[in-house]
Amino acid sequence: MDFDFSDLSNEDLFLQMQDDLYDGLREEIVAETNDALTRGFTPQQILDQGLVAGMEIVGVDFRDGILFVPEVLMAANAMKGGMEILRPLLTETGAEQIGKMVIGTVKGDIHDIGKNLVAMMMEGAGLEVINLGINVDAEQFLAAIREHKPDILGMSALLTTTMPYMKVVIDTLGEEGIRDDIYVMVGGAPVTENFARDVGADAYGRDAAVSVEIAKRHLIAKKQIKMPM
Ligand code: B1M
């Protein structure tokens, strides 16, 4: 199907994207994402003004019982269509690898859009990312840490019922004697700075961009500590 958005102003293009995301129209979202790129918008602008803005409206209507799981799944599928276009742009990096991260959505939770966005932007910042996917339990996190020896562990939770599981994982790291070997970052819509502190994480990532900055700061500090005097 051919789409022509040339009549739309930039502002209307983003409003159209938000509408189409709400309606779960993946093909349209893909075309609009491409169109926004040809207009010179950065992936971050397209995410913020089109995709994430659209998903926020979905979230409100989901909460209020106007939208239901099937519609939200379609919106998520449309969002993933846009993210696939942006992925190579977000992950491309000329820089050498600056560190390694293992990331996953915790047990009981299948939300992965935000976690995948964090993973992509970490890759773009030069980290090697091992993305464990969704519904990841403590044993799986532990096995991945043992296998890949990452600098950073990232955990995502979108539900108030699953966020306490982050503490289970962190406590397990403690019991296994490896808590101090890894920098633990947590994030997701219901997670807060205070919660992160309470569960014993090292950092709270409010969004993907902030998380990348925190990760980079940590890796730079870690390298400096390791440098011979
Ligand atoms: Co769900 N859902 N959902 N859902 N869903 C929420 C989270 C909810 C807030 C909606 C609402 O009521 N307003 C609500 C949770 C309420 C609560 O716990 N207080 C909710 C609910 C209730 C549910 C179900 C229980 C519904 C049901 O079945 N009755 C069910 C649970 C399933 C489960 O997990 N076991 C469910 C299911 C689903 C879908 C499958 C339909 C779908 C997920 C599809 C998918 O992910 N593949 C879905 C969606 C899409 C949403 C909303 C609408 C959107 C989430 C999203 O993708 N946002 C969401 C509403 C909301 O969050 N306001 C909602 C866009 C994304 C870019 O943002 O994920 O916040 P976010 O990620 C950000 C930051 O949080 C941060 O950076 C990201 C990028 O900037 N971040 C990290 C995230 N992870 C990080 C990790 C880090 C650092 C930063 O580590 C270092």
Image (spheres, rainbow, N blue to C red):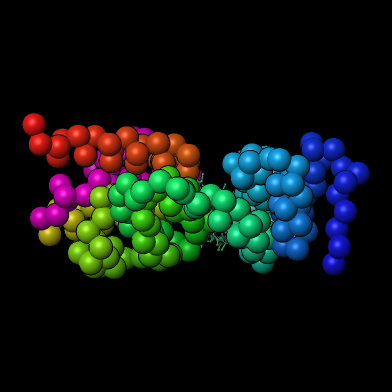
Residue most toward the right? 7
Front-lying residue, 188 or 213 = 213
The picture places residue 150, in percent across and down from the top left corner, at 26, 55
Magenta range:
177-203
User: Is residue 21 something one can see in this rendering?
Assistant: yes
Percent position (x, y) of residue 45?
64, 39
Residue at point 80%, 43% (across, down): 13
In the rendered structure, the answer to whether residue 168 lies left or right of residue 87 reads left
Q: Is residue 180 magenta?
A: yes
Residue at 8% over, 31% down: 229
Q: In terms of image quadrants, where is residue 107? A: bottom left
Q: Residue at x 68, y 40 (%)?
A: 41
Q: Judge whether residue 202 is colored magenta.
A: yes
Q: Residue at x 34, y 41 (%)?
A: 215
Count of numbered tags: 0
> Is residue 56 visible to us here?
no
Considering only vertical position in the picture, is 146 above or below 193? below
As displayed, is residue 200 above or below residue 32? above
Q: Going by the image, does 229 lie left or right of 122?
A: left
Relative side of 123 to 148, left or right? right
x, y percent for residue 87 = 56, 55
